[in-house]
Amino acid sequence: MSFLNLLNMIGGLALFLYGMKTMGDALSKLAGGKLECVLEHMTNNPLKAVLLGAGVTAVIQSSSATTVMIVGFVNSGIMKLAQAAPVIMGANIGTTATSWILSLTGIESSNFFVQMLKPSSFTPILALIGVILLVFMKDDRKNDIGTILLGFAVLMFGMENMSSAVKPLAEVPEFTDLFTAFENPVLGMIVGAVLTAVIQSSSASVGILQAMCATGSVSVGSALPVVMGQNIGTCVTALLSGVGASKNARRASLIHLYFNLIGTFLFMGVFYSVNIFVHFRFLSDAATVATIAIIHSVFNIATTIILLPLSEKIEKLAYLTIPISDNESENVSLEGNLLDERFLERPAFAVAQCKNALCEVAKLTEEAMVLVQKSVITFDEGEINRVFQIEDIIDVKQDEISTYLTKLSAKPLSEKDSRIVGKFGKCIIDFERISDYLKGIGYTLQKMKRKEEKFSRKAIEERDIIFQAVVEILENTVECFVHEDRDMAARIDPLYEVVASLKQVIRKNHNVRLAEGKCSVELGMALTDIITSLERIAGHCSNIAEEEIAAETDQHALHQYARMLKENNEFYREQVQSYQEKYSLLHE
């Protein structure tokens, strides 16, 4: 083999690996996190779990990526360990899709239409379309499709380069002797495992083996144990991702390892035992790219069929390896665990997880608001303490989410996801400030209770009216944020205007009562603190609504929202009037 051929092989390998990664990343980006969300809401039906695991892996072209996601789900408590096993089995089946795509390079025919099925025939067309979509189109979705097509073209070009470069090796005795040695099942399995562990992709290592088949020196007997070893080597990625994770996450990575180990030893044990008596003649035949795809598929499908009913046993084996400790909880709390670092490798899904974490914060602020309103009417020390606890939780969550968003913003995001990340960064601050003001109201109520102070009947009526308005605006804000309801968001600022006017009226009425000696200075300060906090809560709700409305544009929220109000001036006035009538007690 000449030095130039060696360079061509190395270059082809580099292009092959780069094309595979580029295509997989672009496919995930195009899916926008939807595939991972499907896995997140996995059912308890093992067959469905296998099919979904296979489908997701076939699309993103990486069983390692799917398994790492599963480890992240288990670590976060999103998925139970029992649910993870069949998904991992399905991922092994899904990864065989790549080998079948690569097997198209082995098509041989003089028929024009059959020839067009060969990658070398149609990839130049795909590459041209990809360049047009990537260079001349401004739409994110079309750019992603273009990247997928270019990634596929580079992948296939690298495959062809490797195959062409290694063909002269057929004349090199040392090379043919090397692959003869691989007919030893143990040696071949070790080589396949080490190669896959190094490049951390069974799809890529299978592709390299398929390229080697171009020499005609790779027999089925030497290829089979290598493919078996490749399935073991791919477990390294999941095992590494389990380092530093929860015990359940490490068990999930062990399930992946045990499934492949048991499947490999079982398959090889049965196959070579039968071979002793039957003597399979095809083992001495030259392996083709299609042969490798068949071996890869038959092994993974057969192993899944045999071991799926035994998934509980494999789970128990993982528990035996990492026993349950006395202080370990069987039920992993979801609170604060949604933002797993592993999800950052799938930015679109990480954005979705940030939304889930923010929705938790939104629901907590709504809970705190309801508790404060109850305690205003009938003071309850336990409910006020829960409000303080919620505020502490939200403080911690703000730090976690803000840090996670900073890391996420450094990842390759689509234009839409970049805007969403910016929106989340602002909204988490608003929700945290709302919890601060609710905590402040709680302190005021505690102070009044200790001093046994009570508002006058008129002050209570005014307080209850503004409370009702702010409860409604916060409920509407949480709904518009959780469901991304822009129609609901457009109703929030008119209500904020009414809340602001209520605050002014209450202050004016208080000054009158103070001058008439109907209210003490201390109670007046308490009332002022409460209504000021409520008005500021409504203001932060307005900020969140503005960000929700501006999320679909590339303009600053306030500018976009102001323009929207001007264009819908009549609607805005109608909403203000409607809310003024609804909370009209103070205007009578």
Image (spheres, rainbow, N blue to C red):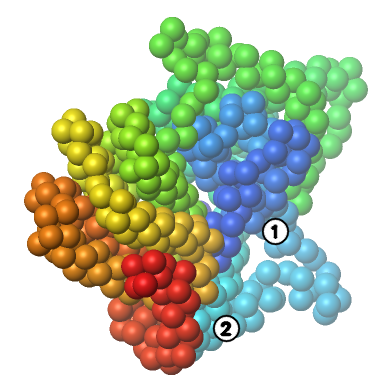
- Residue drawn at x 62%, y 40% as measured from the top left: 176
Give the CA separation, mark 2 to mark 1. 20 Å
Q: Nearer the viewer, residue 257 or 375?
A: 375
The quadrant holding residue 462 is bottom left
- Residue drawn at x 40%, y 70% as measured from the top left: 584
The image shows residue 349 at horizontal and vertical percentages of: 49, 54
Most extreme residue toward the top, as rendered?
326
Circles 2 and 1, Cβ within 8 Å, touching? The answer is: no
- Quick check: 546 above or below 373? below
Q: Which residue is mark 2?
A: 128
Q: Is residue 476 visible?
A: yes
State the SS at label 1.
helix
User: Label 2 sits on what residue type?
Assistant: Leu
- Quick check: 557 above or below 431? below
Question: Is 209 on the left or on the right of 442, as rendered?
Answer: right
- Quick check: 101 above or below 384? below
